[in-house]
Image (cartoon, helix red, strand yellow):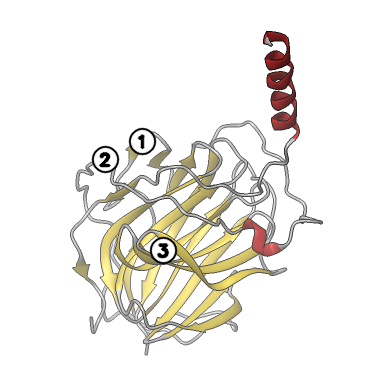
Amino acid sequence: MKRIALTIFVCAVVVAACAPRQAVIETGVSATLTAMAPTSVLPAGRATSTPAPIVQPPTATPAASLAPTTDPQPSATEAATPAPAATQGAIGSPAPTTAPGLPALGAPIFADPFDVPGPWAVGDTDDSTVTVSGGVLTYIQKAPGSFSFRIIGRQGADYFTQVTTTLPRGCGAGDKFGLMFRVQDTDNYYVYMIDCDGRYRLARYGSGASTSVVDWTRSSAIKRGRNAVNKLAVLAKGNDLALYVNDTPLTTATESVYADGRFGLWVGSNVTNNLTVAFDDLEVYSLP
């Protein structure tokens, strides 16, 4: 009897070891830190030197399979200490000159060059580390299969916002990062993300679970590989949302769930240990 039981156990171990790994299983706990109370600013309303592999487009896995089936419930794991306010663009400044693919913009109303921590909650948690140094905010997501984010108190309704991202170490298939907007709280928000396979997605989180407003879509305008630099931008005007990358229009969507809210930075690792994303030049403009 003992010999039979031992044989069954060995077979079970072999089968488990050979089982295929699901493309994305996000089971990590999201560390959410809010550094400031909501503050209306709108009218109306370092990386290590170890390289990571350069990602090639997936061949067999359909795009939809990289979206998680169940998202973890985020929890506040650290109380943040307010830091000095970030540099702000003066309300009433001249409207900026925009690239041909971008809409006409109003005056700059908020800017953070990440020269100082400003309103961001920096430091180390179980699943992530955030630092501000050398003119960038460096965000490290430690373990595969998890995501986390940082939220600031700046909020508004209608605006154009953009942030520049860099991958100093590269990343792997399904790793993703992006810009949160119209954030209500830690469970309810929009996030525009891109991944290391050259795709973008617009997701709405409600009660901690995600719904694709725009499902994963490939774009040649997204730069890939180690040291890839991508500028992500969102135009939010009423129920109309528009996404841009590197001054290139990607898509539009109509959404009425969240009319205003705060901003945040979002990072999710699928396969990479210590996924590192550097954020720079977060800017918010009014609309004409």
Q: Is residue 243 left or right of residue 94?
A: right
Q: To which residue does mark 2 refer?
A: 78
Tell me the number on the disc at residue 180.
3
Q: Give me the C-alpha separation between circle 1 and circle 2.
A: 7 Å
Q: Which residue type does callout 3 highlight? A: Met
Q: Residue at x 34, y 76 (%)?
A: 258
Q: Residue at x 32, y 56 (%)?
A: 151
Q: Is residue 24 left or right of residue 12?
A: left
Ranked by sequence position, the earlier of labels 1 and 3 is 1
Residue 78: percent from the left, percent from the top? 26, 40
Q: To which residue does mark 1 refer?
A: 125
Q: Is residue 231 left or right of residue 126?
A: right
* Quadrant of the drawing holding the N terminus: top right
- Verify CB contact (< 8 Å) between mark 3 and mark 2: no
The one of 276 and 173 positioned closer to us in this rendering = 173
Whether residue 102 appears in this view of the structure is no
Q: Give me the C-alpha separation between circle 3 and circle 2.
A: 19 Å
Q: Give me the C-alpha separation between circle 1 and circle 3.
A: 20 Å
Q: Is the residue 187 above or below the residue 236 in the image?
A: above
Residue 26: percent from the left, percent from the top? 52, 47
Q: Residue at x 41, y 63 (%)?
A: 180
Residue 191: percent from the left, percent from the top? 45, 65
Residue 219: percent from the left, percent from the top? 69, 69
- Verify CB contact (< 8 Å) between mark 1 and mark 2: yes
Ranked by sequence position, the earlier of labels 3 and 2 is 2
Q: Residue furthest front?
A: 1
Whether residue 161 appears in this view of the structure is yes
